Each structure stands twice: as structure tokens, then as C-alpha cells.
Amino acid sequence: MEKLNHRTRAQIESLLHDGNVIELQRRLCSRMSFGTAGLRAAMGAGFALINDLTIIQSTQGLYKYLSIYFPDLGKRGIVVGYDTRGQEASGCTSERLAKLTAAVMLSKDIPVYLFSTYVPTPFVPYAVKNLGAAAGVMLTASHNPKEDNGYKVYWVNGAQISAPHDKEILKCIEESLEPWPESWNENLCSSSPLRSDPLVCISKCYMEELTSVCFHRELNAKTPLKFVHSAFHGVGHNYVQQAFAVFNLPPPIPVPEQKDPDSEFSTVSCPNPEEGESVLELSLRLAGKEGATIVLATDPDADRLAVAEKCDNRWKVFTGNEMAALLGWWMLLNWKDRHPEMVDMESVCMLATTVSSKILKAFAQIEGFHFEETLPGFKWIGNKIHELEKKGKVVLFAFEESIGFMCGSMVPDKDGVSAAAVVAEMAAYLNTKNLTLNRQLENIYEIYGPHISRTSYVICHDPPTIKRIFSRLRNWNGKDEYPDSCGVYRITHIRDVTTGYDSSQPDHKCVLPLTKNSQMVTFTFHSGIVATLRTSGTEPKIKYYTEFCALPGKRDVSSLEEELQKVTTALVEEFLEPDKNNLIRRSV
């Protein structure tokens, strides 16, 4: 039985031979920790990277924690899935790492539902809930660069792990660093009677349950619209095709160069459809050739969705916030159609992360349903959904601005496969009303008020500078208080989730959980603009998000965009002081 990976060993030996102490320190003197998307790092040798050893160690720690938490772990088992990533230099592939994850559990007589082929990330949390498993692990780095991979852990409720589980699992990992003899034994995946393949069962159940968010099957079959789909060299092609069939929609035209897995992501500069037209070039070109007016692009693990529509001979790529306005409207419209007797909407709920558009909040204020806001990251949304459902709430829709959508509540995580079919059906329905997605977005803004947003970042490689920037905001003009204006723009409320302060609450205590290990401050301006400054959990960035939430009836969007740009500029220049602090501005 092979007990080591010769390629990663060779990497360390080469660095040692070259005397590259700095790189050896970077790789060997720190460990990965759970961020907003689990463990995520480059593939390669070292404790700070994703490789055979760190995945085995992580799974041994996960086993230790689960065996304490679940007395019936031996009956429940865990789910393991993987995407199509791989790296020849390190010998690491998502499939191999998934098999090692399974081997660790199987060696301790824990049943493992290991998918026999690559699957969309949402299939893992769906399987956890469907099979009653204790947890799930997905080997994926989603839309990250090709060098990266990741280890995403889902809890028994189907949501990504959050506190205190993440910290406790890390503690167990640190206590389980020596690989067990059978942890390297990939053969257990084919020889152990405790290993089963949930692919057929879960695919069938998922597609059947997908009908819960399909509202117009007969109309779908008649649509003249054509759709193009890009799988971005990832897992999405087959599953999006199946979802369209479930909805009775014409099959989307695949982008041939991008429909099959390719761990090099050879036709895109980066495998992230959120980057817009620059990475959607092949999709838009094919759509023009085929006469398609809607382009759908799932990211490599198919949990996120980018959408573009041809409007007046040009392509509009919708932002995540714009798409959420449309999907939120759509899910609410069909809920009301199916529940005409519902007068009290308090049992209905939608969610969004705090850095996302407030458009759902505007919906809720007018329509009367319940709206919840969470910290950034779908792990917070998934766990909040679990709480709400225990209270009898029905969650219709949730989203984060980085093109992550959850339509219905069959999967407590973002899901690009279901979202693709739902968007296509919505477009087909609107077409029967002589409306486009973009025109309906304008209609939504007329009813609920325009919501115009901007998202960007500056780069800072010096942590003390970041600390000083945020400390200055909390001690404005040398006093123990926050600023009451930014340039000529008056601030009415401030929320600081790093310290737990919220001036809009009667007791001045933040409703959202504390995030002491990261910085995040939100400013609400007198004009209705909401702005947030936050540090990234995975990159040396300070991100900023601004949005103009105008009242219904405001039609001059260009003036709103102009004012939002002015406030955004003031926010960056006055609060971040890029030139003084040597911050690197985003190059567009």
C-alpha cells in the first residue's frame, strides 16, 4: 500500500536542496483554517496547502469530532463528493482527495456515501439531508484559480459548518496529525462494504424535488427563447441539461469548448463567471451565432450562476444583486399565485447577506413577509434557514451578491443548477408578457424603489495598516466615536460587527453575530445609501460595497448612479486614504 505522494515529497526536497527557507516556512510553519468556504488553498506540498496529507489530517480530525458529537455516527455515515480539479505537479486531484477522505472514515468503520463521479457542490448538502448523514465533505475550490483546491464541510442540517463546530474540528485536527495506517488506503473505497455510491439515488431525488420550484411546465415547452449554457470547464453540463428537461424547457445550447471538465480551465483567464463579459466571450459569441437571447454560466462546481441577456443589440450581464431582485420577485409571485388564501405573509421568509442588496428588505416592507440578514457567506444563511424552519417559517429565496442563489429550500446552500432552470423559466414566462428580464428589473425598481449598487476593493499587504484604518474609524478625530459624515454626506447609522455596536438598535447592540477576527463596518447615509467596508477572509483586500436604496417612484436612475459614485469615491478617499496608506487600487 502506497503511504506517500512522491510528487509532493519531491517538491519539499527540491526546496530544501535549493535552500529556499522562505518558501519552506510559508508551506510548513502554518496550517489552513476554516474560512467562509471551508479549507481552501493552493495544491502542493506543505501543511499550509491542500495535499494528500493535509486532507487525511483534516478528515481524521473531522472523524474525531463527529464520533464525539454523534453517538450514532456508525449508522449515519458521511457524504463525500468532488469536482473536476487536478494538478499534475502535486499529483492532487479532487477525486483522489475524496477517496482519501473516504478511506479515513471507512478505516474507522464509518459508512461513506462516496459519489462515483464528479457532482455539483449542492448535491453534497442535499445528500446529507436526504440520507440523514452526520456530515458531508465536498472537495472543491469552486471558482478559484486552477492552482487551488478546497475541503468544504457540511453539518447534519445540510448547512456549511459554522461556530463552534469549525473551531472544535480544527482543534481535533491538531490532535490527529499522525496518519493512521489505513488512512492512505484508497482501495477501501472499492473493497469496503460500508462504501456506497449515492449518485443515482440522489440525482433522481434531486431532479424530482426540483419540480417544487417549477411553476409553468406547459408554458415552458412552447417558449421560442433559446438559451446558451457554459459549464466553465466544470461539473455543470449534464446536470443543467437534466434540470431543463425537468422544467420541460428546450435544452440549452452548450458552449462546446467549455462543456467538458478541464482542470486547466484553458479557455478562460480565470474560472469565475462573475468577472462578466471578459470571461463570457465564447458564450456570447455562440449565442449571437445561434440566435439565443439568454446566456447562463455556472461556475466550475455549479453552485453559482451568471446571467446575460441581449438587450437592443448589446449584452447586459446582470450583477448578483440585480439577478436577486428578479429571482426574489419571481419566487414571491409564484408563492402568492399558489397560496391565494394567504393574507398573513409572516410565515414566508427571504434572506440575504449583509453586504448584498437591500432589495429583498424593500420587498418585505411592502409585501409583509419576513426578511433576515446574515453575515457574508452562505454558511450563515444555511444555518439561519435551519433556525427559521424550526420556527415554522417557509424560506422562498436567499442570496449573496457574488452570484449565489438559493431558490426554494431543498438545498440550504447556493445552487447554480436549480437557479439556471428557474431563471430560464422566468425568462420564458416574461416573454409571453412581451417583457425581457431587464425590462422586468426596471418594473421591480419602479414598484419597490431603484437599488443601484457598486462592489470593489483595494489591496493591502500590511495587516497593521488595515488595523490602523479601522481603528481610525472607531476613534474619529481622536475621540472614542464614529464619523457622522463622509465628505458632505451625512451618516445616520453605523453598525460595527467587529465590536458588536449598532447605533440603529435601541440598546446599541448589533443583531448580527460578532466577528472579532475580521473587520466590518456599515454606514447608512441620510440619502438612503448603505456602504460597508470589510476585510476579506482569504485575500489581502479591503472590500467596499455601496448601494443606493431609493424610494418607489424614483425614475431618474442616472442621477442615482452619479450620486452613488460620488459617495463611493468619498468613502474610499476619506475612510481608506489609499494614497497615504499605500493601498493598491483595483485595476479595471
Image (tube, rainbow, N blue to C red):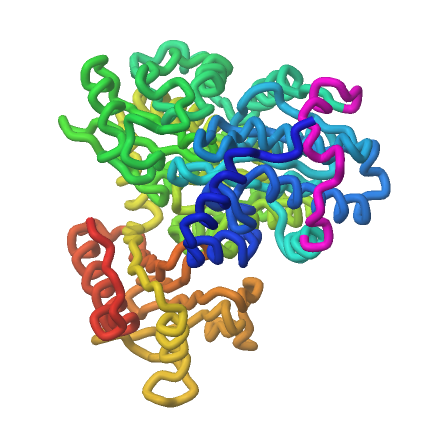
x and y, in percent, of residue 319 in the image = 31, 42
Residue 447: in magenta span: no
Q: Inspect this view and state whether residue 443 appears.
A: no
**Numbered circles on residues, count:** 0
Q: Residue furthest right?
A: 71
Q: Inspect this view and state whether residue 231 appears.
A: yes
Q: Residue furthest left?
A: 313
Residue 184: in magenta span: yes
x and y, in percent, of residue 178 in the image = 71, 47
| Residue 153 left/right relative to 529 | right
Question: In percent of the image, x 74 and y 23: which residue is there?
Answer: 195
Q: Which residues are magenta?
A: 174-194
Question: In percent of the image, x 70 and y 22: which residue is there?
Answer: 187
Query: Where 526 sits versus 365, above or below?
Result: below
Question: In percent of the image, x 35 and y 28: which residue is there?
Answer: 265
Q: Where is residue 57, by image quadrant?
A: top right
x and y, in percent, of residue 386 in the image = 65, 45
x and y, in percent, of residue 434 in the image = 26, 23
Question: In percent of the image, x 39 and y 49: which residue is there?
Answer: 359
Depth check, front residue: 27 or 388: 27
Q: Residue furthest front?
A: 17
Query: Where 50 sits versus 422, above or below?
Result: below
Depth check, front residue: 245 or 202: 202
Q: Where is residue 200, by image quadrant?
A: top right
Which quadrant is the N terminus positioned in? top right
Query: Where 458 sits versus 418, above or below?
Result: below
| Residue 7 left/right relative to 456 | right
